[in-house]
Amino acid sequence: MADGITITFAPVGRGGSGDLVVFVGDDLALGGSAREMLGSAGAELVARAAGSEKFKGRSLSALTLPAPAGVEADRLVVVGLGSDKDRAKIEWPVLGGFTAGKVSGRQARIVLDWPGGQVSAADAADFALGARLRAYSFDRYKTKKKPDAEEKSGTDLTLMLQAHAEAHASAQASAAVAEGVTLARDLINEPPNVLFPEEFARRASDLAKLGVEIEVIEPARMRELGMGALLAVAQGSAREPRVVLMRWNGGAPGEAPVAFIGKGVVFDSGGVSIKSAGGMEDMKGDMGGAAAVVGTMHALAARKAKVNAVGAIGIVENMPDGASYRPSDIVTSMSGQTIEVINTDAEGRLVLADVIWHVQGACKPRLMIDLATLTGAIIVALGQDIAGLFSNDDDLAAKLHEAGEAVGEKVWRMPLIPAYDKAIDSKFADMKNTGGRHGGAATAASFIKRYVNDVPWAHLDIAGVGMSSSANEINRSWGAGWGVRLLDRFVRDNYEGR
């Protein structure tokens, strides 16, 4: 059981206690299995109650009733699916999350059918995924629980459908993805006095239990490698930085890996260019990209994905101190390119520059995708529901867009043009670390692009979606764990076993 929820699969019609959940469309008609379990009296009860409660069976609506006589249940929960058009485009994780929310802390049997519709094993597994994600909470530091929370036991769901055996098998993979999202959420939600760079590296190293090869690069080795950009960001903190490489070898021997790179700034004060106090507490989540990479590697390894994959994270803390790097400093990155520091709060791109360069040389990837809570500018442009996508490869960008649409973690492609690259030219060095206010997300992406060689590459600016994003049916957490489901689907659809 994870986060207080257990999910099992069973044949339709199995008896039991607790709640009974059935689905209806906008015509309020029950599916064949639900009609058989409820009988004619139950169907009439639903119709009468819907009229008095003005329940129309709209998509993601629910009606809760006392169970009718003769039905083994405490309550009857009727979930609306909407019109035929709505039912043709059901987002199964969303439906699973919504339904789980209606029976939270209870035991429930859920009949997965409706008129003219039978749920496939894959759809049932996605339903279960959504239910697991909805159940997540982060309250480990609360010493006093609310009275109602103390009374609640875990949520226990039995999903009943014809393809129950196949659904159980499919759900093993979806459970691995849920574990990856949960891991990412935990990392983002942890306070920075707990999740400092060394501790983050230790938690990432726990993936070795799943067969992931781990390499932790400490500061002395970073200096040998010439990671001057990353080290500059870290030098104002009492906490030393780490770089972690995670290798999952599930594909053909010698096949070039797909590479995921994450920005892991465990706390970003802004450094000498210090941020304003308002909202600074949110900067514990400035490692959302690295959290997504660790969560993705967990998901791939836990479900034994048939792919070679590398996850790389640069973990630092950006603090003001007498030793901090300063505006006007010039630092030398691992690539040999020099960077004029204009603003010490534009630090994530310096971290990514050295990690990306190292991954290209050490891992020889077939493609690279970096994730970073990089700019406030992307939030201004796209809000908190869509991530910004920058890429040097149309095919890679299209695949990420398709994967995002499939799982509901959407991306929108943003432009990379020579004017943005020119904006980061420096009078004193090869480049400067910010191009100014205008086009801030694009000039930041252009900076990263200067460290990408002849490799398909995509940059995901997840500042809006990675933390404090809009609550939805599968996420009630401040740290969303955004990106794990996207990258897992991207791999599964395009590179696994190929």
Image (spheres, rainbow, N blue to C red):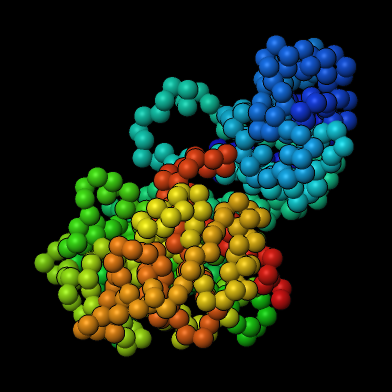
The quarter holding residue 320 reads: bottom left
Quarter of the image where one finds residue 393: bottom right
Residue 29, image x and y in percent?
83, 26
Q: Position of residue 140 (x, y in %)?
A: 40, 41
Q: Quadrant of the N terminus?
A: top right
Compared to residue 446, the image places residue 413 above or below, namely: above
Left or right relative to 347: residue 382 = right
The mark total stands at: 0
85 above or below 311? above
- Residue in the image at 63% along x and 74% along y: 395
The image shows residue 152, relative to residue 436, as above or below, that is: above
Residue drawn at (67%, 72%) of the image: 495
What residue appears at the point 69 percent right and 44 percent down from the top-left corner? 92
Question: Quadrant location of the C terminus?
Answer: bottom right
Residue 239 percent across, percent down from the top left: 25, 64
Q: Nearer the viewer, residue 262 or 450?
A: 450
At 62% from the left and 85% from the top, the residue drawn is: 254
Residue at the limit of the structure toward the front, as seen here: 419
Give how far across and how far down residue 265 sits, in percent.
33, 62
Residue 25 occupies which quadrant of the picture?
top right
**Taking 11 as reference, is 401 above or below it?**
below
Q: Would residue 287 be seen by someone viewing this image from the given angle? A: no
Q: Residue furthest bottom?
A: 336
- Nearer to the camera, 11 or 51: 51
Q: Which residue occupies the extreme left position in the image?
A: 322
Task: Evaluate whether residue 30 shows in this view.
Answer: yes
